Image: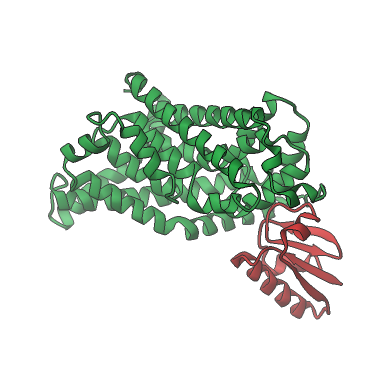
Chain colours: A green, B red
Amino acid sequence: MIFDWLNDRLLKMEWLSELIRLLVEKVFGLSINDKIGGSIHFFIYDTIKIFILLSALIFVISYIQSYFPPERTKKILRRVKGIKGNILGALLGTITPFCSCSSIPIFIGFTSAGLPLGVIFSFLISSPMVDLASLMLLMSFFGHKIAIAYVVVGLILAVVGGTLIEKFRLEKYVEGYVREIEDVDAEVPEMTHGERISYSKEQVRDIIKGVWLYVLIGVGIGAAIHNWIPQSVIENVIGENNPFAVLLATIVSIPMYADIFGTLPIAEALFAKGVDLGTIMSFMMAVTALSLPSLIMLSKVVKPKLLAIFVSIVTVGIIIVGYIFNAFSYIFM
Amino acid sequence: MVIKILGSGCANCKKLEANVREALKQLGIEATIEKVEDFKDIMAYGVMRTPALVVDDQVKVMGRVPSIEGIKKYL
């Protein structure tokens, strides 16, 4: 299939793996089946691959995103009602440029525009967890079936989570000052083609600057898991021998703050060690969807009770996703 | 001319301010620069991404830092 052929060369970069294998074996004189040689191969190959993919993907995606600023997303969302709003909110979450630093203004802006709380949360859940860049990276690391499954499940989680928050009628737990802010529609200044290109370049630079350390740490942990931690330890702690693996992976990952880019090499190494797919999905979703810094930001606009309900819904959702995937993982093998 | 820099003190806000000052200097224009750091005031412009550049109460740029040359167009 041509799709697989392209995936192997462009996203998986098998040629790069081969090149680094030659480097490790011929130049360093190590076998990649050794612990040391294997770690070095994993580290160099994954680091180069992630940075190439990151730069290319962020550039293309920022260009697309420059057409969907949150100010426009707000106007689009205001026009739809009910569950359609949640679905659209989750989908727009995947293409609206968003970092946890702008979660407060986005929350306030959406609230003052009169968007239902559930729609806002659908957006806030999907935005960090699922985006176009993560879809492409997942394809590179796990193939297209698993990548698409992750995205679809992430979107479902965002829609269901938002809908539940809506059903519980929690509007009173939004901080008072948020509701007092008037809704203003900014004239979004139209960007020229040249501005979009330079915006995309700036995004590549800014994002790389922000995540390079997480990527290196992630690849480092991945390399360690890949070559140094015995299979039996992994199997007993988060493998199929432990029925609480999904639970453990989720709870441990929630406070962690990392980008999906730093998370993937760890997930890749765990996958290679035979950790179940559902456990890995839960791990990735918990790291990206919930983190201490984003919760601290959110606590400035919502009261503790709403924050707690939000965290509970997302956590339970991620755990359910993990167990369902583990039960049906044979479909993806 | 009144120029406002919207943003809660992030690194990019400072960069935007520096670029604006440099652009003003190169053009030889006198202007007051105000920093708007409170979320409420920022939201009053309908801006959801910082930093943003407001020239005479018109939002010119949001969510990015244009180059010095790029800023000159707005002044």
Above or below, comparing residue A72 to residue B25 in the picture: above
Image quarter where the C terminus of chain A lies is top left
**Could you say where residue A242 lies in the image, as x and y percent from the top left?**
25, 31
| Of the pair A241 and A6, the residue shown nearer to us | A241
Q: Can residue A8 be seen in this snapshot?
A: no
Residue at the location (28% across, 41% down)?
Answer: A269
Using the image as rendered, state which of residue A328 and residue A254 is in the foreground. A254
x then y, percent, for residue B61: 74, 58
Q: Residue at x 40, y 35 (%)?
A: A282
Residue A136: where, in percent of width, then height? 46, 37
**Which residue is found at the position 65% from the left and 27% from the top?**
A167
Numbered disc total: 0
**Rendered position, A19 above or below A330:** below
Q: Is residue B36 above or below residue A163?
A: below
Question: Could you tell whether A277 is left or right of A167 in the image?
Answer: left
Q: Is residue A12 left or right of residue A225?
A: right
User: Do we see residue B28 in this rendering?
Assistant: yes
Q: Give the position of the N terminus of chain A as an image quadrant.
A: top left
| Nearer to us in this view, B16 or A105 | A105
Image position, residue B70 (x, y; %): 72, 64
B54 left or right of A56 in image: right
